């Protein structure tokens, strides 16, 4: 049995976790390739005009997997363990996916208001006719590998924060930060300009949190603002030269969050640049803006 996983959007919420979970259940995993021109074009054609760019990319990955596997895994993410909601468009992904592709959609609703994450995972295992013992073992291994990955990420962050290069913080959703095609290799471009790039997702959050921002009901908004607060309170904050936020065109949630992100950095006298990306964004224009931003620093 082969499970297809689109390498976009919700995949980046827990990269590596789902492959490990399904493989340890005894399934083969087919991960769609890295985002490319063909995938984006497929997604743009299939998507509603008002859909944000990140969702268009997801549809492209979904269509690439169609008829290449037994099931395509598209979970419905509703709330996290803190009872905060994910993007509202996440809720309808499985239903829309069923309309777009012929391959059966493997899905389950992850709603922490109703049940724990592990319990929902067991439901997925049951749908694949796996034993309780097999499911428990797969969950245990996947969570352990995820923990190891986070520890390595923290170690990498500590090395970056001590770098003598000018440090640039990149703020965005994981699915924009880690997809080089979507963000037009912003990290690579900045590194060539002599910067040490830190993804906001890499920043560890301490136990003591003094919230200096509004209470959000969006999972990603609270997470991003917590991490911004954490890095701004970090002892080496004086080494942060600038911050750049990357947003997908037509992301309604980002339109609200952007004001708080910008204010947080500007209150700390850190230069801030806001970039909007979509399928029409050109590399030359982005390169010029990044060069100008680095020159101002």
Image (cartoon, rainbow, N blue to C red):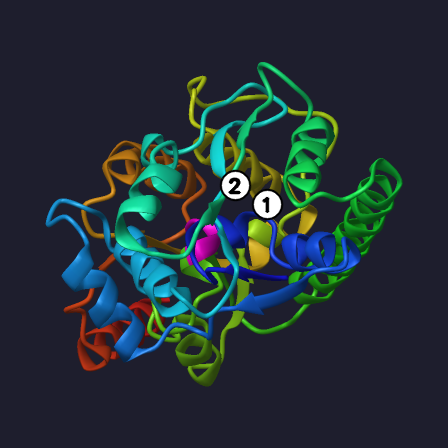
172 left or right of 84? left
Residue 274 in view (yes/no): no
- Badge 2: residue crowd in 10 Å (few <14, some 14–19, many ≥20): many
Residue 288 lies, with reference to residue 261, above or below; the image says: below
Q: Which mark is residue 228?
A: 2
Give me the C-alpha separation between circle 1 and circle 2. Answer: 5 Å
Q: Which mark is residue 231?
A: 1
Residue 16 pos. (x, y %): 66, 59
Question: Residues at badges 1 and 2 in contact (C-beta under 8 Å)?
Answer: yes
294 left or right of 82? left
Residue 108 in view (yes/no): yes
Residue 147 lies, with reference to residue 254, above or below; the image says: below
Residue 35 sits in which quadrant? bottom left
Residue 297 sits in which quadrant? bottom left
Residue furthest left in the image: 49
Residue drawn where x is 79% and y is 49% of the image: 147
Residue 24 pos. (x, y %): 79, 56
Residue drawn where x is 61% and y is 39% of the image: 230
Camera-side residue of 236 and 249 = 249
- Label 2 SS: helix
Residue 41 sits in which quadrant? bottom left
Camera-side residue of 101 and 5 = 101
Residue 159 pos. (x, y %): 73, 66
Work out which quarter of the rendered image holds the N terminus and state it: bottom right
- Label 1 SS: helix
Range shown magenta: 171-175
Residue 38 pos. (x, y %): 27, 78
Camera-side residue of 230 and 64 = 64
Camera-side residue of 283 and 98 = 98
> Is residue 265 inside the magenta stretch?
no
């Amino acid at each position: 049995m082969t499970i297809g996983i689109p390498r976009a959007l919700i995949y980046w919420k827990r990269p590596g976790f789902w492959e490990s979970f399904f493989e340890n259940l005894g399934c083969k995993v087919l991960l769609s390739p890295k985002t490319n021109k063909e995938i984006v074009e497929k997604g743009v054609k299939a998507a509603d005009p008002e859909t944000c760019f990140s969702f268009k990319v997801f549809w492209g990955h979904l269509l690439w997997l169609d008829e290449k596997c037994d099931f395509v895994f598209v979970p419905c993410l509703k709330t996290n363990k803190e009872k905060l909601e994910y993007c509202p468009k996440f809720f309808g992904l499985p239903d829309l996916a069923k309309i777009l592709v012929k391959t059966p959609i493997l899905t389950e609703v992850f709603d922490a208001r109703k049940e724990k994450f592990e319990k929902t995972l067991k439901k997925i295992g049951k749908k694949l006719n796996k034993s309780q013992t097999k499911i428990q073992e797969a969950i245990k291994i996947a969570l352990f590998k995820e923990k190891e990955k986070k520890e390595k990420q923290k170690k990498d962050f500590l090395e970056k924060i001590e770098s003598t290069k000018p440090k640039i913080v990149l703020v965005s959703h994981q699915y924009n930060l880690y997809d080089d095609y979507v963000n037009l290799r912003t990290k690579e471009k900045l590194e060539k300009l002599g910067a040490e790039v830190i993804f906001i997702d890499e920043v560890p959050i301490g136990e003591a949190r003094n919230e200096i921002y509004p209470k959000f009901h969006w999972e990603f908004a609270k997470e991003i603002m917590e991490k911004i607060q954490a890095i701004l309170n970090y002892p080496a904050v004086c080494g942060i030269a600038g911050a750049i936020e990357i947003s997908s065109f037509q992301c309604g949630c980002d339109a609200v969050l952007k004001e708080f992100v910008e204010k947080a950095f500007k209150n700390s006298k850190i230069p801030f640049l806001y970039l909007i990306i979509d399928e029409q964004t050109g590399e030359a224009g982005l390169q010029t803006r990044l060069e100008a931003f680095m020159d101002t620093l």
